[in-house]
Image (spheres, rainbow, N blue to C red):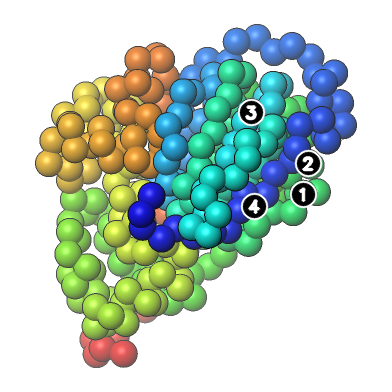
């Protein structure tokens, strides 16, 4: 906790605020399921014993029935008090601690294309109501549509092309200057442009994309060693440590739940964007 963290606090729906919350019908046991695509991810299932962790993507947490407890950490004030929530938006790069004994849904937004401004309280209330109506078997597209999340078109072609290269070669770009060369920018200008366009530092975004490779490899029948190699980790132990830092539990603990992994057709960039854009300029800018 010695490093500086973003101090933006989570937007929350406090327990008891949502109409009909206490009267929600008792749900059957929600089996653990992860829907993952190149750009977004969705978890539905039992509340997990999560350690404090720093999320890479902006995350919407929703209680299916029982409220969950959430606290956040800020450099200027340390840990907040625990708050009982029915839904919350946790900004990206936020150190937080979430505990739940009931079923949950977690929506992990695409840093590049999803709207990054915080959802309002009304958005959270309406989105949670639509999610409850759809039920725990909701698909990834319907779950995101429940919150009215709008896609944005990348404004910097050079940064978007680097994003595409990360998808094609997830084990590449260990050095930032290699990615900067693809964008025809100096490392310092690339770092600043990438952070502004994507909302995450380059290394953190690359880690998020590598986690999608991990999940796709596991969905294809691979084990953790296969997933580590496919995503460019040195070993399964290296992957386990990184996974815990991002999600608050080791990958092996998630697999031990018997999680089902569904692959989505979600694309990191729309096909029409890729085909319509001209090639990046050869000169640095």
Q: In the rendered structure, which disc, 2 or 4, sits on the residue that comes first in sequence?
A: 2
- Distance between mark 1 and mark 4 Cα atoms: 14 Å
Q: Which residue is mark 2?
A: 125
Classify residue 233 by image quadrant.
top left
**Foreground tag (2 vs 3):** 3
- Distance between mark 2 and mark 3 Cα atoms: 15 Å
- Distance between mark 4 and mark 3 Cα atoms: 23 Å
Residue 68 is marked as: 3
Residue 146 visible here: no
Q: Which residue is mark 4?
A: 149
At which x and y percent is residue 51?
42, 32
Q: In the rendered structure, which disc, 1 or 4, sits on the residue that comes first in sequence?
A: 1
Q: Secondary structure at mark 4?
A: loop
Q: Which residue is mark 1?
A: 121
Neighbourhood count class around disc 4 (C-alpha, 10 Å): few under 14, some 14–19, many 20 upward = some
Q: Secondary structure at mark 1?
A: helix
Q: Secondary structure at mark 2?
A: helix
- Residue 6 sits above or below residue 87 on the image: below
- Distance between mark 3 and mark 1 Cα atoms: 17 Å
Q: In the rendered structure, which disc, 4 or 3, sits on the residue that comes first in sequence?
A: 3
């Amino acid at each position: 906790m010695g490093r500086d963290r973003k101090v933006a606090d989570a937007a929350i729906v406090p327990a008891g605020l949502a109409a009909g919350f206490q009267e929600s019908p008792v749900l059957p046991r929600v089996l653990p399921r992860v829907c993952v695509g190149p750009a977004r991810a969705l978890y539905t299932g039992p509340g997990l014993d999560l350690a404090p962790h720093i999320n890479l993507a902006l995350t919407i947490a929703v209680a299916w029935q029982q409220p969950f407890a959430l606290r956040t950490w800020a450099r200027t004030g340390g840990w907040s008090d625990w708050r009982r929530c029915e839904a919350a938006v946790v900004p990206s790069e936020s150190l937080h601690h979430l505990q739940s004994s009931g079923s949950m849904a977690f929506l992990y937004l695409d840093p590049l294309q999803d709207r990054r401004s915080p959802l309002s309280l009304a958005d959270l209330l309406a989105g949670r109501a639509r999610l409850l109506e759809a039920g725990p078997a909701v698909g990834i597209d319907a779950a995101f549509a429940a919150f009215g999340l709008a896609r944005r078109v990348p404004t910097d072609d050079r940064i978007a092309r680097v994003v595409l290269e990360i998808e094609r070669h997830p084990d590449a770009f260990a050095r930032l200057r290699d990615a900067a060369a693809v964008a025809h920018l100096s490392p310092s200008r690339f770092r600043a442009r990438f952070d502004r366009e994507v909302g995450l530092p380059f290394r953190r975004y690359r880690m998020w994309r590598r986690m999608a490779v991990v999940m796709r490899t596991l969905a294809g029948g691979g084990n953790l060693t296969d997933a580590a190699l496919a995503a460019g980790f040195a070993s399964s132990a290296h992957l386990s440590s990184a996974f815990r830092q991002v999600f608050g539990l080791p990958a092996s603990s998630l697999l031990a739940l018997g999680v089902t992994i569904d692959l989505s057709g979600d694309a990191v960039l729309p096909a029409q964007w890729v085909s319509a854009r001209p090639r990046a300029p050869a000169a640095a800018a």
